[in-house]
Every structure is written in structure tokens, then in C-alpha cells.
Amino acid sequence: MERQNEASLAGKVVIITGASRGVGRQAALDFARRGANLVLAARTVEPNDDAPGTLGETLKQVEAMGAGALAVPTDLADRRDLERLVDAAIDRFGGIDILVNNAAVTQGAMWSKRFMDLTDEEWRYQFDVNLHAPFALTQLAVPSMASRGGGRILNVSAGNGEVFRLPEEPVFLQSHSGINLVVPGYFASKRALDRLGSVIAPELAPQNIFVIGMHPGWVATEIVEARLAKVPPGETNESRPVPMTIPSRMLVYFAACENPIEYSGRLFWAEREMADMGIALD
């Protein structure tokens, strides 16, 4: 692929889910740096030991950069909360230009369970947050995007087959540096999100709305770093997660690129595409 020019994001209205920490919070900072107005969604309002970062902390950081911002506490498994999130964005900023479906279930007992030990509730919750919420938010945001001349739906995915450009799925690691990587509900729901993006992209393209999937890679989020810190000495694999700034920078690129039709309905790998197109960190 050839790198495209990037249009200004000043004044654009961006909803980011999972904005209390990780790639979501980093993306909020990077969009704010470009002059966008941020609508921040997450469930974590109060600090807790298991999940560093809160929605309020991200809001303060974004506002300190001079960006317009709104924090909306949101349970992504609750349809009413999703409706309130979209309504709040429209009420505050007049519409929606970019939706970043970033949030995912990355904690809890299900992350240490094998397939046969998963409960029905745990399985369904992964799909509620990772797939059903992006589905609902996309439906809710599209009318506003269409009325403003178009928009972007950016889905943060996982390491699924298409992103590696192989005829078959690569053999998946059981663990990495002592961290369990076999999470059936997470990867199944993320794969479904990839397919959802590819099949709705042609329907939305005539309205100038483009759907792009991005695999962030193994990212050095706060949660990942905390897990790695618990790995006994000598058991750590030599490979290290990539900085959060890499997937965040690529989300900004896909939001700002001048000809998104080239990317719509497709799935990309942040680290590889960033290197191939020579995109530097801001």
C-alpha cells in the first residue's frame, strides 16, 4: 500500500470506547492532539487495583490538551447505555464523524479458563461487549454520520487469519511469557467483528461511511505490563509487546486518510502497515 495524505481532524467528533486505559486512552490523546472533539466511553469510573486508569483521568488529560471532551460512563453490554452514549455525543457536539470500537473484555476469570470450563454467561458477555456493542453503536451512529456527509467506523480487532495474509489460520500460541492466550470467547467474538465489518462496508460506502478493521498486535497496555511483571525471572520470552502509540497512530491515520475506500471492509495489522507506509509517530 502507498501512504495517503491525511486530512485535518480539527473539529471532528470521535467516540472512543474503552477509553479509560490502554489503546483507547492513547487514541484519545492522539486524536485530541489533532484537534478532534472526544466522546469517551468506559465502565471504569472509580480506581481499582485490577484495572489501572479511569474515565475521569482520560478526560482530564484530554481537556488539558485543549480539546473538547465529554466522558460518558458506559456499560457496553447494556443497550440503553449505548443509546445514551450516542445521544450524548450528538447533544454535546452536534453529530458523530468517527466511531472507534476499541473496548473489549480483557479481564476476569474467563481469561484463565479453558474452553470446557467456561460458563454460558462468560461466553455471552464476551460477545455482548466485543461484538454486539460495536454492532449497535454502528447502527446508532450511521444516521448522524450520513447527515454530516460521511464518517469512519474503526474496529480494533485481534490476531485473526486474514491479517497475516496466510491461506489458513496460523497455529495459535497457548501462552506467552506465562500468560494464558487461549480465550475462546474473546477470539471468536473478535473474528465475528472482522466479518461484520467486511460485509457491511459495501452497504455503507455509498453514504461515504467506511469500515476499517485493525489488529493492534500484542500491545504494552497497563494490564499487559502488570501481567508481565508477575512472570517469574527466566520465564519471560524475548519478544516484547509494542508501545500503545503504534496502534493509536494507525487509528488516527485511518481516520484521517483522504481515500478510505481503499481500506474499507479490510483488516490491517498496525505495526506492519505503519512500517510499510513509513508512518512516523507524531
Image (cartoon, rainbow, N blue to C red):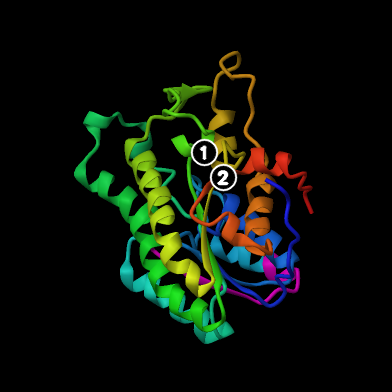
Residue 73 magenta-drawn? yes
Q: Residue at x 32, y 41 (%)?
A: 185
Q: Give the range drawn in magenta.
A: 61-76
Residue located at (38% from left, 75% from top): 83
Q: What element carries label 1?
A: helix
Would you place residue 278 above or below residue 196 in this image? above
Within 10 Å of the Cα at label 1, are there few (<14), some (14-19), or many (20+) other Cα atoms?
many
Question: Alpha-carbon neighbours of circle 2 within 10 Å: few (<14), some, or many (≥20)?
Answer: many
Asked whether disc 2 touches disc 1, contact meaning CB atoms under 8 Å apart, the reply is: yes
Q: In which quarter of the image is the C terminus?
A: bottom right
Q: What residue type is labelled 2?
A: Phe
**Residue 112 figure quarter:** top left
The residue that mark 1 highlights is 163
Residue at the top extreme of this rendering: 234
The spot of residue 49 in percent (x, y) is 51, 46
Which residue type does callout 1 highlight? Val
Find residue 78 and name its label.
Answer: none
- C-alpha distance separating marks 2 and 1: 6 Å
Q: Residue 39, how many percent across, how many down? A: 56, 71
Residue 160 shows in the view: no
What residue is shown with label 2? Answer: 268
